[in-house]
Each structure stands twice: as structure tokens, then as C-alpha cells.
Amino acid sequence: MHSAPSRPGSFQPSGPLRGTLKVPGDKSISHRSLMLSALAVGESKITGLLEGEDVLATAAAMRAMGAHIERTGEGHWTVNGVGVGGLLQPAGALDMGNSGTSTRLLMGLVASHRLTATFIGDASLSKRPMGRVIDPLSQMGAEFTASPGGMLPLMVRGLVPAVPICYRLPVASAQVKSAVLLAGLNIAGITEVIEPVPTRDHSERMLRGFGADLTVDVDADGVRHIRLMGEAELQPQQIDVPGDPSSAAFFIVAALITPGSEVTVTHVGMNPTRTGIYKMLEAMGADLTYSNAREVGGEPVADITARHSVLRGIDVPADVAPSMIDEFPVFFVAASMAQGRTTTSGLDELRVKESDRLALMATGLKAIGARVEEREDGLVIDGTGGEPLEGGATVTSALDHRIAMSFAVAGQHTYHPVTVDDVSPIATSFPTFESILHILQVQH
Ligand SMILES: O=C(O)C1=C[C@@H](OP(=O)(O)O)[C@@H](O)[C@H](O)C1
Ligand SMILES: C=C(OP(=O)(O)O)C(=O)O
């Protein structure tokens, strides 16, 4: 799916960043809205859908399994679903491109349907661990033939009727949680996921919104017990997808590090399981203000304004990690220009994303003059105190959109341009990133 040719990008400061912008729809919510709409009987309408390559991979897969999915305008999509249990045998392999979320959630859906599906992906996705979903889905009765190390390409043979399980997550992962819950939709009885560390809860919110019988209880130790009653009947919905807080974070950090900047991002999802980046930036002294707080389709939303701020280094508590898991690359950029030391830990998961994000960020930041120590589970960064970084180097993005965008942001406050060897992966989650950055640069 990530088929755009490789293309380098050069980023350099052009003075303050100014303006008001909207970022595309939330990637996690976009995937889920297509999947659940495809499992409802009748017509759902989605607005604000992210039209990035990852979400288009999900749309193509749901079509291949029988859903009628149509784009009716920019971000406007109509889905006629097949009903829970109604997915059909796809004719060919499902190409997941670069998208871990598509792969793991769809493996869950397929696991409890009477069909066999082969999942393939790009070079990055083919190195990512799928054992974490193969384990619980095998307990439910699905059969897997995977490449060595539990990787793609892999084949799933679903089972009907499959077996409901109670599964305690061994790793803090919303994708694993969601895979088990989505499998549970077509299994009689209660499927339970025990979540010791909270992760993004979009699946729970949206399953309930579609009419599933799902409860969440938090026990005395703060552990979440999520129970879903199977053989659910989902009702079609109208979904307005909020702007992606992970995408917004790039422009918020760009404004914070670039002197004279003031940027407002409107309609940003403020689900507390996603806002760790904003809390940590505020702890560093960031001037952020929130306005127009409201609720859209069961998710909190607000406008965020960021003004240039001299940030102070902090110790990021390890338990904040899940609520900012995709924002660490750009957070490291902010830390590299802060006053004093920033320490992060508990970030082993960053090594199994689209790239090894700890290694790539440490190498790239050092190449452009930052002081970074790479530890096994985090980075320790001594910032410049608000001074620009040196720049003047080419960094590697390794099929990782967030690495590419993070270095584009770093290039807003350097003495010499920052070159990213390949910016094409940005299209997986944020196809309009470069054009928005350009607009902010020229609106002085
Ligand atoms: O469920 C989701 O939509 C996602 C969960 C996270 O992955 P993990 O579940 O692997 O932590 C995140 O990194 C990814 O971008 C999207
Ligand atoms: C990790 C990410 O996505 P995925 O797992 O869906 O590839 C991401 O978008 O940063």
C-alpha cells in the first residue's frame, strides 16, 4: 500500500510559524470506524476520515471481505456493512502496507470468521511482531501459519464457533486489546480483556457507540476489566472523526521550539488516553491553551494554541508512555532544544514500531548536533537551552512516517538545513503534512 516512490526532503527555518490549521482525522478512530461500520447491518456515514495510506489499506481489506465502501467527498465515506459473522473469503492476499493497526485488528476480525486470509505488508511491517496477537487468537481457536519470528507474511484460518477467552495483556497495547475484542464480537459468551496499564480506549468507546454490550470495570489496583458480550449486533452510525492529536503534536512542537511562533490547531481529539504529550510539554513549561472544548461522537475535542516557549528538561514517568506512545520521536526533538536534561524510560515498545524509534531518533538527533544518550529503554537528552541545533546532515527515516515528520520539525530551528532521506512514508498517516508546514512558514 505504501507504494509512493522514495523522495528526500530538506527542511530549514524560515522564521516564526503562524496560523490556524486543522489536521486530518485520527488514524486509530478512522481504522475502527471503517471496521465497525463494515460489521454493522445497514449504511454508516463517516466524516473527517483520515485518507492516509494506512487507513486506505483497512478500507481495501474490508471491501475485499464483502463490505461496500464508497468515498463520497473529501473525508466523507459511506459504508454498507455485512453484519457480524458476515465477512467473506477475500480473493487475494490482504496488503496491509505499513500499517500495524490494520494488520493486528483485522487478524482479530478474521480469527472468528469462517475464512482464511493471508496478510502481507511492506519491509517495515514485515519485521514487526505479530506473536502478541497470534497468542490470544490461537487460544480462541484460530490457526496461524506465520513467517519466522511470528511475522508477515502470515495466514490466518478463522474458526466458527470460536472460543471466548479471558486474556490479561502481557504488553500495554491497544492493538492487542482491540484484536481480542474484535474477535469476541462473533463469539457467543463473554470475551474479557484485562488491562493492567491503560491504553487508548477508542475501541471500547466505539463498540459501545455501535450498540455492543461492553462494560469496563476498574478494580482496586486500577486494573481495567473489559467485557464484551459476543454475537453482537452492531447498528449503523454517523461518525465524525476528530483531528488526530498525534498529527497535531508535530505542529505544536514546531511552534514551541521556533521563536516568535503562535499556532492554533482546531478540532483535536483530547481523549485522555492520548494526551500524554501535551501534559509532558506543559510540565516542561510549554505555553499551551485549550479552547472550545466539546464532545464529538463520544470523544472529547478542543482547539489547542501553542506559543514559542523555552522548555525545561523533565523526567518523563514511565507510566505516561502509553498515552504518548507515538509522540516520543517529536518529543525527543523538543527535549533536544530544552534547558537541561530530559530522561525517558520504559520505552521498549518504541523499538518495534515502524522502525526502532529509539535508535533512529538517537542517531538522527546526534547527526544534527543534539546531545543524546541511547539507553535500552529510553533516551537521555541534554538540551540546547533554546538555541538552534546545528543541522546540516541527512537523517534516515526507514519507512517511518513519524521519524520523517519529527526531523522536519527539528529543521525549523537549526543553523543548517536538515535533510530526511525519504519523506514518502509521511503519506501513511498525514498526506498534507508538508503543505501545512509550508503554509505556516509563509503566514508571517
Ligand atoms: O490501536 C491503535 O490504533 C494504535 C495503538 C498503538 O500501538 P500498540 O498497540 O502497538 O501500542 C499505536 O502505536 C498505534 O499507532 C495505533
Ligand atoms: C505505530 C504506529 O502505527 P501502526 O502500529 O498502525 O503501524 C504509528 O502510527 O506511529
Image (cartoon, rainbow, N blue to C red):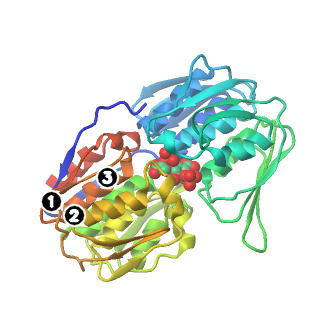
36 left or right of 417?
Answer: right
Q: Position of residue 339 (x, y in %)?
A: 29, 81
- In the rendered image, the quadrant that contains the N terminus is top left
Residue situated furthest top in the rendering:
91
Kind of residue at disc 2: Ile
- The residues tagged by marks 1 and 3 sit, at their Cα atoms, a distance apart of 17 Å
Q: Earlier in the sequence, mark 1 or mark 3?
A: 1
Q: Is mark 1 within 8 Å of ligand 2?
A: no
Residue hosting label 2: 368
Q: Residue at x 83, y 43 (%)?
A: 164
Residue hosting label 1: 392
Q: Residue at x 24, y 46 (%)?
A: 421
Residue hosting label 3: 405
User: Is disc 2 in contact with disc 1, using a CB cutoff of under 8 Å?
Assistant: yes
Secondary element under disc 2, as helix, strand or loop, is loop
Which tag is nearer the camera, tag 1 or tag 3? Answer: 1
Compare residues 211 and 184 and report the one nearer the observer: 184
Residue situated furthest right in the rendering:
189
Compare residues 354 and 66 and report the one nearer the observer: 354
Up the image or down, 2 lies above or below 174; here it is above
For label 3, the crowd category at 10 Å Cα-Cα, with few meaning under 14, some 14 to 19 and many 20 or more, is many
- The residues tagged by marks 2 and 3 sit, at their Cα atoms, a distance apart of 15 Å
- The residues tagged by marks 2 and 1 sit, at their Cα atoms, a distance apart of 6 Å
Q: Earlier in the sequence, mark 2 or mark 1?
A: 2
